[in-house]
Image (tube, rainbow, N blue to C red):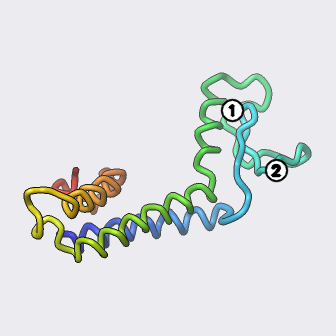
């Protein structure tokens, strides 16, 4: 089961990485200003990358949405993908693909396996996610 779980997670990470690269890749960050999301550093003459409501007079909810979008800028997503891949590499190194079989009573290897299951839980709504992968 560990190999399938790891393959599932790698595929999701590849999807996130591809989307982040297509949306701007490495480099600029994003910042919310009012209801708009702008590249950093902000060029006041440039239009927003994303607008979550009217430029003037948007609601607090529109501004909160803009802040949420800005927190998921491509550069940050790429860092998150790399961090998850580091967890997977540690899992492979320590568990040799058999964490649940090597130490069913728990311990360090089981903790690595639980960590990978926790990373995969983010994708529980994906059609290929399996119920037994829930932490």
Residue visible at 64% across and 44% down?
70
Closer to the camera in the image, 19 or 6 = 6
Residue 23 vs 2, above or below: the answer is: above
| Residue 68 falls left or right of residue 130 | right
Give the Cα distance between marks 2 and 1: 22 Å
Residue visible at 58% across and 39% down?
68
Which label was assigned to residue 1?
none
Closer to viewer: mark 2 or mark 1: 2
* Badge 2 element: loop
* Badge 1 element: loop
Quick one: label 2 or label 1, which is nearer the N terminus?
Answer: 2
Crowd around label 2: few <14 · some 14–19 · many ≥20 (10 Å): few
Q: Which residue is mark 1?
A: 53
Residue 67: horizontal and vertical position, in percent? 63, 37
Residue 35 vs 80, above or below: the answer is: above
Residue visible at 59% across and 62% down?
20
Residue 55: horizontal and vertical position, in percent? 78, 32
Which label was assigned to residue 41?
2
Residue 44: horizontal and vertical position, in percent? 89, 43
Q: Quadrant of the N terminus?
A: bottom left
């Amino acid at each position: 089961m560990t190999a399938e779980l790891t393959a599932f997670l790698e595929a999701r990470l590849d999807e996130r990485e591809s989307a982040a690269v297509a949306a701007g890749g490495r480099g600029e960050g994003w910042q919310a200003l009012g209801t708009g999301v702008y590249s950093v550093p902000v060029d006041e003459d440039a239009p927003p990358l994303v607008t979550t409501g009217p430029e003037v007079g948007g609601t607090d909810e529109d501004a909160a949405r803009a802040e949420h979008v800005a927190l998921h800028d491509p550069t940050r997503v790429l860092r998150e993908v790399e961090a998850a891949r580091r967890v997977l590499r540690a899992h492979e190194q320590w568990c040799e693909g058999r964490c649940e079989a090597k130490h069913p009573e728990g311990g360090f290897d089981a903790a690595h396996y639980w960590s990978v299951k926790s990373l995969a839980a983010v994708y529980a709504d994906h059609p290929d996610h399996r119920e037994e992968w829930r932490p």
